[in-house]
Amino acid sequence: MEILFQQIVSGLATGGIYGSVALALVMIYQATDVVNYAQGEMAMFSTYLAWTMMNAGLPYWVAFFGTLVVSFIGGVLIERIVIRPVERAPILTIVIVCIGLLVILNSVAGWIYSYIQKPFPSPFPPRPIVLGNVVFGAHDIGAIVVTLIVLAFLYAFFRFTTLGLAMRAAAQNPASSRLCGIRVGWMLAIGWGLAAMVGAVAGMMVAPIVFLDPNMMAGILIYAFASATLGGFTSPGGAVIGGLIVGVIENIVGTYVHFIGTELKLTVALALILVVLVFKPSGLFGRAAVHRV
Amino acid sequence: MTARASRIGLLVVLAATVAVPLVVSNFRLFQFTQVAIYAIALLGLNMLTGYNGQISLGHGAFYAVGAYTTAIMIDQWQVPYPLTIIAAGVLCLIVGFLFGIPALRLEGLYLALATFALALAVPQILKYFEHWTGGSQGIVLSKPNPPWGLKISPDLWLYYLTLAILVVLFVLAHNLLAGRTGRAVVAIRDNPIAAGAMGVNTALYKSLTFGVSAAYTGVAGALSALVIAFVAPDAFNVFLSITFLVGIVIGGLASISGAVFGALFVQFVPNWAQDISKAAPWAIYGVFLILFMYVMPRGIAGGLWLILARASRRGTARRA
C-alpha cells in the first residue's frame, strides 16, 4: 500500500511537469491553432540559459526569474519572426516550420553546450520529507507546488486582467477583437511568450531529475502531448489534470505491469495518445472540433 | 517542355546513374546507393504526405520494420535476401494499411502528433524485443554476393540492385499517380468532402495510400539493412523520420522527381555541414526547412519546373 501511495505521489510530481508543458502546448494551440512541436526544445533551451546564469554566479532565484524574462522575449521573437509569415498557411506548412524550429534549437544547444549531460540544481532542500511510512522527495513536492502556482498565476492573469481578457478575445474571435481595437497579432505573440515562460518553468523543474542535455525534453514532450490529448487540446485546466493522470498512470504501470517496466515508457504514451484520439478525440475536458463545410 | 524532351532527359539521367560506378570511389558508390534508398523511402512518404495530404512524422518506423524484417529473416531463418525484400514490402503494406485505419479518424495535426509519438517510441520497442532484434547490439549481416557468378564486388551489385528496384518502383508510382487512382488521391487531399461526393471511397483510398507509402519505405529499409549490413535500434530514432520529412520538403512535395532531389540533399548536405560542427547538419536542416516553406514551398522540383516552364514559354514566344 505504501509503495502504491509513494508511486502516486511521485507520479503526481512528474505529472505536474508534463502538465505544465501540456499547458504551454494548449495555450499556443488555443491562441493560434498551432501545435508547437518545438515546445520541448524551447523549454530545454531556456533551462540551458538558467544554467549559464547560475554558472556565472547568480543565485538560483535570480537566475530563475531572469530566465523567465529572457524566455518570454524569446517566445515573442519566435512568433514574430518564424511563425507569423506562415500563420494562415496550410497545417502541413506549420508543422514543418515547427519541426524546423525543433531541430534548430536542438542542434544549436548541442553546438553551444555539447551533448554531455550536466547536473542542474534544485532550489529545494535535498533532505526527504517523511510522513508516516511514506517518504517524499522535497523536489517532487516543490515541483508540484511550483506547477500549481504557475497555474494559479495564469488563471488570475486570464481571468482578472484586461490584457488576459484581450488575449482570450483575440483567440476566440480575431475579427471582432480587431474591430474593438485589440492588436490581435501582438496578443498571439504574447501568447507564445507566456508559453515559452511556462515551458521554462517546466524545464527548470525537470532538469534536476533527468539531468540537463539537449535531448532531455524528447520524452517529456511526448508525455505532454499525451496529457494535452487526454485532457483535451481546448482545455487548459484539462491539460494539467491530464498531465497529473498521465504521470500517475506512467508510474503505476511501470511498477506493477512487469512486461512494460521502464523500457516501454514511451510506448505507453504512444498507446495512450492513439487510444484517446481514436475513442475520444476531443479528450476528457475538451470541446469537439466542429468544422463548417 | 515536350514529353519527348523529358523522356530523353530521363534516359540521359538513367545512363549517367548506370555509369556512376565507373568513375567514383567505393565510398562514393556506397553514398550513391544510399541516395537511391532514400529516394525510394521519400517517394513513399511523398505519396502519403505530398499527394494525399496525410502528415506522417513517423515514417522512420516503417523503414525500421523493413530493415528488421530483412535482418531477422536472414539472421534467424537464413532466408535468401531477395525474398526478404519482398517480405519487407508486403509486411509494411499490411502494417501501414492497419495503421492507416485509425489514422482515418485523425486529421492534420492529430495525425502528425500520433505519428510523431510513433517515431519517438520506435527505438524502445525495438530494444524491448531483444530476442528477435538483438537489443541495443543490433544484428550484423554479411553483404550478399552477386548472383550468376558475376565477377563484381558486392557493393557494386547492391548499387545496381537498388537502382533497378528504384526504377521499377518509380515507374509504378508514376503510373499509379498519373491515372484515376492518383486523381482520387489528390482530390482527397484538396477537398475530402467534394471527393467523397464525387464517388471516391475516401476511407479506402486513404488507408491504401498509407499502406503503399509504408511499403515503399519498408522496401527502402530492407535495402538499407543489406547495404549497411547492420541494423541497430538507435539508427531508427525520431531524427530519421524528420530526415524523411526534410527530404520531401526540400525535394518537392507532391512530385516524383522531388524524391531524388530530396535524397541527394539529405545524403550529401549533412556531410559537408559536418565539417563545421557535429551539430551543424541539423541546424542547417532546420534553417532549410523553414526557408523552403517561406520561399520555395514546392521544393527543388517545383522550382526547377517553374524555371523550365518560363524558359520554354520565352522560347516559344520568340519563335512566334
Image (cartoon, helix red, strand yellow):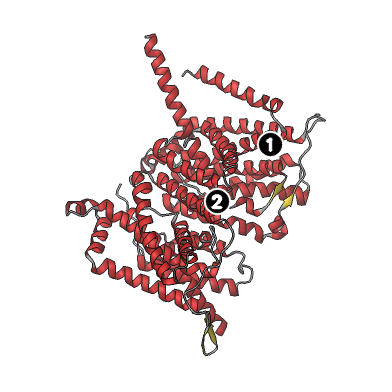
Q: Where is residue B228 in the image (x, y as percent from the top left)?
A: 70, 43
Q: Residue furthest top?
A: B320
Work out whether residue B113 can be spotted. yes
Asked if badges 2 and 1 are on one and the same chain, I answer yes
Q: Where is residue B134 in the image (x, y as percent from the top left)?
A: 72, 57
- For mark 1, give the secondary structure: helix
Work out whether residue B96 can be spotted. no
Q: Which chain carries label 2?
A: B
Residue that appears at 35% across and 65% down: A236
Quarter of the figure with residue B130 = bottom right
Residue B46 drawn above or below residue A139: above
Say which residue label 2 marks.
B98
Give the mark toward the camera: 2 or 1.
Answer: 1
Q: Say which of A245 and B180 sits in front.
A: A245
- For residue B30, which numbered disc appears in the image? 1
Residue A267 drawn above or below residue A255: above
- For residue A293, which numbered disc appears in the image? none
Q: Mark 2 and 1 residues: CB-CB less than 8 Å, in contact? A: no
Q: Mark 1 lies on which chain?
A: B
Q: Which residue lies furthest to the right in this view?
A: B149
Residue that appears at 50% across and 74% down: A11
Q: Which residue lies furthest to the front in this view?
A: A57
